[in-house]
Image (cartoon, grey):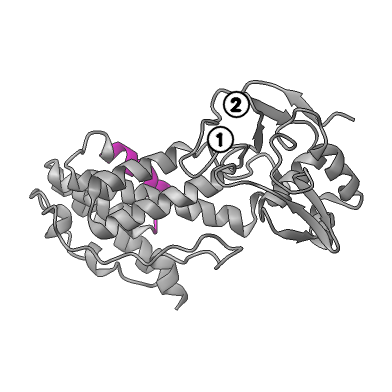
């Protein structure tokens, strides 16, 4: 049984990453594997896709057989070895393990070896962390560069075509990381006074995330600095109404002064103080997903 059908997928970014070698596995969107020539290889059938997805949720760690069977069903071990043994396919290409295989059968589970820089998710998280560290230093050019590089890897919801794992906490965490990368990028563009197109981009995002205060604050700043203060005030009132009526909380201090900083046409100082961000967690499998925004205040 052949699990792979070769095809070219032009929207998959498979160039060498700055974290190591070329990306081999792409999960930020539809699940895709990439061969030695940088060509995307489509996985055929739901069973091998689900198996590869569940192993890539925790690469280089033993995934218990009960977890594998819960997603894929019994018999996954044999299917996994057939999948990994396909000649000249990405799962077998350039193996790094001592025994020459990517997929190992451990006493109580399966383990998928992934090298540094081979998984787009890892490269994405690394670039988000670098952008946040640069934000703490107020190095806005670096923030814009690294946040933009992270977002360039994003093709859609993680594991979008694998329903069995699309709602996994790892996928939820990555969605949160994307929002944080967007917020870092917008913050940098505001400080660099590069406002072209920001109002439209932020306008879409605040509709998608009506309780996300940082995005609302950033849109209010853009509107205030482009002589649209009435719209900024209206946006603040809408945000406050949503938070009070839906969550029972008031907007945080940075958003509560719409006639001040949020609606001011003045350019912010490039050395203005910003509270430092805590170092982000690497993912649910390490520290768990971060909590953010008004929803976390409401939960308390």
> Which one is nearer the viewer's eye here, 297 or 288?
288
Query: Viewed as shown, does residue 265 lie left or right of 100?
Result: left
Q: Give the magenta-colored segment's residue range.
A: 199-211
Query: Viewed as shown, does residue 54 lie left or right of 29?
Result: right
Residue 237 visible (yes or no)? no
Which residue shows up at 25% across the image and 67% down it?
275
The C terminus - image quarter: bottom left
Relative vertical location of residue 95 with respect to residue 10 in this rendering, above or below: below
Crowd class of label 1 (few under 14; some 14 to 19; many from 20; radius 10 Å): many
Chief SS of the magenta region = helix
Which residue shows up at 58% across the image and 65% down it?
286
Q: Which residue is mark 2?
A: 38
**Residue 76 at x, y = what percent?**
87, 49
Q: Which residue is mark 1?
A: 22
The N terminus - image quarter: top right
Which residue shows up at 50% across the image and 46% down it?
123
């Amino acid at each position: 049984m052949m699990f792979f059908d070769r095809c070219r997928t032009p929207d998959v970014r498979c160039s060498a990453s700055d974290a190591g070698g070329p990306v081999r596995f792409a999960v930020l969107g539809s699940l895709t594997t990439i061969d030695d020539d940088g060509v995307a290889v489509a996985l055929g059938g739901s069973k091998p896709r689900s198996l590869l997805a569940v192993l890539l949720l925790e690469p280089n760690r033993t995934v218990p057989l009960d977890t594998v069977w819960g997603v894929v069903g019994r018999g996954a071990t044999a299917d996994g070895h057939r999948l990994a043994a396909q000649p000249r396919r990405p799962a077998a290409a350039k193996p790094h393990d001592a025994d020459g295989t990517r997929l190992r059968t451990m006493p109580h589970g399966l383990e998928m070896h992934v090298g540094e820089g081979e998984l787009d998710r890892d490269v994405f998280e690394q670039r988000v962390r670098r952008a946040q560290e640069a934000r703490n230093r107020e190095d806005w050019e670096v923030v814009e560069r690294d946040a933009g590089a992270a977002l360039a890897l994003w093709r859609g919801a993680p594991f979008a075509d694998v329903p069995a794992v699309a709602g996994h906490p790892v996928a939820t965490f990555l969605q949160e990381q994307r929002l944080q990368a967007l917020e870092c990028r917008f913050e940098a563009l505001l400080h660099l006074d590069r406002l072209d197109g920001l109002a439209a981009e932020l306008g879409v995002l605040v509709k998608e995330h009506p309780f996300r205060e940082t995005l609302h604050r950033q849109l209010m700043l853009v509107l205030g600095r482009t002589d649209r203060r009435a719209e900024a005030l209206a946006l603040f009132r809408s945000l406050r109404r949503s938070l009070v009526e839906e969550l029972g909380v008031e907007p945080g201090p940075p958003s509560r002064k719409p006639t001040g900083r949020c609606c001011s046409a003045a350019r912010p100082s490039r050395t203005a103080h910003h509270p430092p961000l805590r170092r982000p967690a690497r993912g649910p499998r390490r520290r768990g997903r971060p909590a953010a925004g008004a929803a976390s205040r409401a939960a308390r």
